[in-house]
Amino acid sequence: MKDTPIPYEIVKQRIKESNLPSIGKASIREVKRLINEIEQASGKKFIRMEMGIPGLPAVTIGLEAQKKALDNGVAALYPDIDGIPELKKEMSRFCKNFLDIDVKPASCIPTVGSMQAGFATFLTFQHLQKGKDTTLFIDPGFPVQKQQHRILGAKFESFDVYDFRGDKLKDKLESYLKKGNIHSIIYSNPNNPSWICFTEKELRIIGELAKKYDAIVIEDLAYFGMDFRKDISSPGQPPYQATVAKYTDKYVLFISSSKAFSYAGERLGVMVLSDTLFQGQYPDLKPYFGTDNLGHAIVYGSVYALSSGTSHSAQYAMAAILKACNDGTYNFVQGMIEYRDKAHVMKKMFTDNGFKIVYDKDEDQALSDGFYFTISYPGYSGEELLEELLYYGISAISLAITGSQRLEGLRACVSLVPKSQFPELEERLKAFAKNHPL
Ligand SMILES: Cc1ncc(COP(=O)(O)O)c(C=O)c1O
């Protein structure tokens, strides 16, 4: 029995009582519950790095606009399924100002978070073209999107991009696409969980191959603007958020209010279809949606059937925030810079104590500091490390549940760790290193 920051017996007992077959394979919510129980039993606070939830207050501009909309009575009214005109217009402007792409307001569809954007997209794409019945995940990825596929009975394939960066991505991607069954390719950028960001070269490879094999690219921009190596915050000025939309005309972007504007609680995202896709004709859709037009099928088929649009007042909030970003009166990148600064310090604490950063490079460039980073400890599997760290009051999730082949790795999220906990984190990591000599 070791001398650990959280009493050994308490952690051991709670793990046993949790009845989880393996802590390393537990879902994020299961890990969260277990830690809550250990915290309660031990009276000691954990360094909580398991959940990817915003650690900053919601953007005030949004709150004010939302309250005003409620005072004006929108709560009583169904919103239009395709979204309020103000939000659609500001999202179209936002795409021009921060991605340097042209999309019509009609092609910007508010959803109940990017989560629903995913569900609606996967549901629709399943019926898009006979013979193309599979989504390709460029992993690691957000586990719930695979769960959505399972619930829908939708097929997917996946590969871990770790060994296929840069030019190597081409052959790997083509090996899947040439089979002819892939209707869409999905990834997040910056990536949850690894925090890699595709380079322009890689985005070009993805876009050009998608075009060649008539696949749609679904680009999940949940962490918009958080590749802090370049400041994209000036509207209409380069540099811009990197996007595959530069290299293909058949794309869907998920732009979430959750992290960029700390608006997770109101469940609002926007699904942006390229104009080509929004206007696209796919005859195989007709039996399911009564139309062969993809834009119509998504809005009046999938989004209608799922929830009849999304929260009326929250749409006013996001419209107001986007307008302020577009007008240059609110700098949303600056609003999130704390994540970068915290990651910088925390990563160093881990590496100073023997840990390695698992996903550490975008081709030849060091990764950005941001919302997540990945860690491993020599000689430990991710599963073992996750459990071992619990005795030191540190929580994370295993990369194994994200489609990563780096089974030694864990994902750490910086958002919920206040700077005031840094001395404690350092102390606990030192204790860990002392008890696990390399
Ligand atoms: C990659 C990715 N996509 C989507 C989401 C969900 O976004 P939303 O809160 O808009 O549903 C998350 C949230 O963690 C995420 O990490």
Image (tube, rainbow, N blue to C red):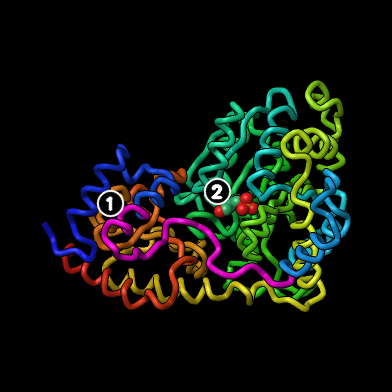
Q: Which image quarter holds the N terminus?
A: bottom left
Residue 214 drawn at (x, y percent): 73, 37
What's the magenta region? 36-61
Kindly indicate the quadrant of the structure image that contains residue 291. top right
Q: In this rendered view, identify the residue nearer to me: 365 or 238.
A: 238
Kindly indicate the quadrant of the structure image that contains residue 389. bottom left
Q: In this rendered view, identify the residue nearer to me: 349 or 162.
A: 349
Question: Relative to residue 436, is residue 228 drawn left or right?
Answer: right
Tell me the amino acid under the disc marked 1: Glu
Question: Is label 2 in a helix, a strand or a loop?
Answer: helix
Tell me the amino acid under the disc marked 2: Leu
Q: In this rendered view, identify the residue nearer to me: 294 or 258.
A: 258
Question: Relative to residue 155, is residue 239 drawn left or right?
Answer: right
Residue at the image point whose x is 52% and y is 38% from the top: 158
Q: Is residue 86 above or below residue 12?
A: below
Mark 1 — residue?
387
Residue at the image point whose x is 73% and y is 39% from the top: 307
Mark 2 — residue?
169
Question: Is label 1 in a helix, a strand or a loop?
Answer: helix
Q: In this rendered view, identify the residue nearer to me: 373 or 208.
A: 373
